[in-house]
Image: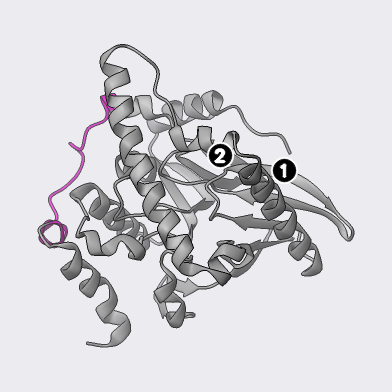
Amino acid sequence: MRNADPRTLHYKLMIMAKEGKRRVEVVVISDLHLGTYGCRADALVAYLKSIKPGVLILNGDIIDIWQFKKHYFPADHMKVVKHILNMLVKGTQVYYITGNHDEMFRKFENFNLGSFKIVNQLTLSLDGKSTWFFHGDVFDLVMQNSKWLAKLGAVGYDGLILLNSWVNHLLKAVGRKPVRLSQRVKDNVKAALKYIDDFELTAANHGAKREVNAVVCGHIHKPQMRTIETGKGDVLYLNSGDWIENLTALEYNNKQWVLHHFDVSTLENSTDADEKPDEATDALIGMNSKDIFKLMTQEFYGN
């Protein structure tokens, strides 16, 4: 399967926008990290407003509970929650697959409320092909053996993303192209490249053992779509990337997966004029992160 040209996808998006939201059978997004400085909630909201999925799979690290003590949860982040809730109301089936940054939700596996379900992993049959969805941190030895080290790395990554935003702001002011500092670090560190390759091979091999046709992950913030040969046959490996740097989603339509890259240039002409006032949402936006988190979890605790 070949990767689609992001420019072609954007062109189709603009054409279909005149006819209404794009209908997509399955959409997978992961690693939103709501509650962190790096989350591109503005871009994510614009993307969610452009689609009408039958199934939305949130593949882990949606709310970054590790960073929640910062009391940072701005209005744009709450808009993401609002749009997902709107999708639920309008009939979209939403699966929340737990990740390592939102691992506290794992104790609520199989919680089901209407069209919303929390799971630790998910297997679906798409046009007769078995597809296994999971976040991917189970393969991360750092996470399994040194959680404190992983959390320290997460804090450092969030700081680097914040620094990157300042750098890009200055570059834009002088007419220069933006840069992605963390991506440069990853691309120039052999250990990081080996980790990504090992992760993809491990995911594919486990998929082959489970006799599935495809595996869909998140976790490593590396969007990818490629077929991997294993000792038990070929497995399609898919990774939905993230909404911090790559701004990517996986879309399934007409028996085919596409890796969609959001075009940030569309944000310059975007408007929220079509947004109707929502008293409940406005009330949420006015809360601090501690109150928001309590409200989000009170349904699970039953109080």
Res. 226 mark: 1
Which residue is under mark 2? 186
Dot 1 alpha-carbon crowd within 10 angstroms: few under 14, some 14 to 19, many 20 or more: some
Identify which amino acid the numbered label 1 is placed on: Arg
Answer left or right for 151 relative to 268: right
Percent position of residue 188, x then y? 59, 33
SS at mark 1 in the image: strand
Place residue 8 in its image quadrant: top right
Place residue 258 in its image quadrant: top right
Q: Is residue 67 above or below residue 293?
A: above
Dot 2 alpha-carbon crowd within 10 angstroms: few under 14, some 14 to 19, many 20 or more: few
Q: Give the range drawn in magenta.
A: 268-285
Question: Looking at the image, do the residues carrying marks 2 and 1 touch, with CB atoms under 8 Å apart?
Answer: no
Q: Which of 15 and 66 is in front in this view?
A: 66
Say whether disc 2 or disc 1 marks the residue closer to the N-terminus: 2
Percent position of residue 68, x then y? 27, 63
Q: How far apart are the alpha carbons under marks 2 and 1?
A: 20 Å
| Of marks 2 and 1, the one in the foreground | 2
Identify which amino acid the numbered label 2 is placed on: Lys
Answer left or right for 273 relative to 135: left
Q: Is residue 150 above or below residue 300?
A: above
Is residue 255 visible in the rendered image? The answer is: no
Is residue 53 visible in the rendered image? The answer is: yes
Residue plotted at (53% across, 55% down): 219
Colour pattern: one colour
Residue plotted at (42% across, 64% down): 101
- Outermost residue, bottom side: 302
Q: Which of 29 and 21 is in front in this view?
A: 29
Percent position of residue 148, x then y? 44, 67
Quadrant location of the C terminus in the rendered image: bottom left
Answer left or right for 223 relative to 155: right
Quadrant location of the N terminus in the rendered image: top right
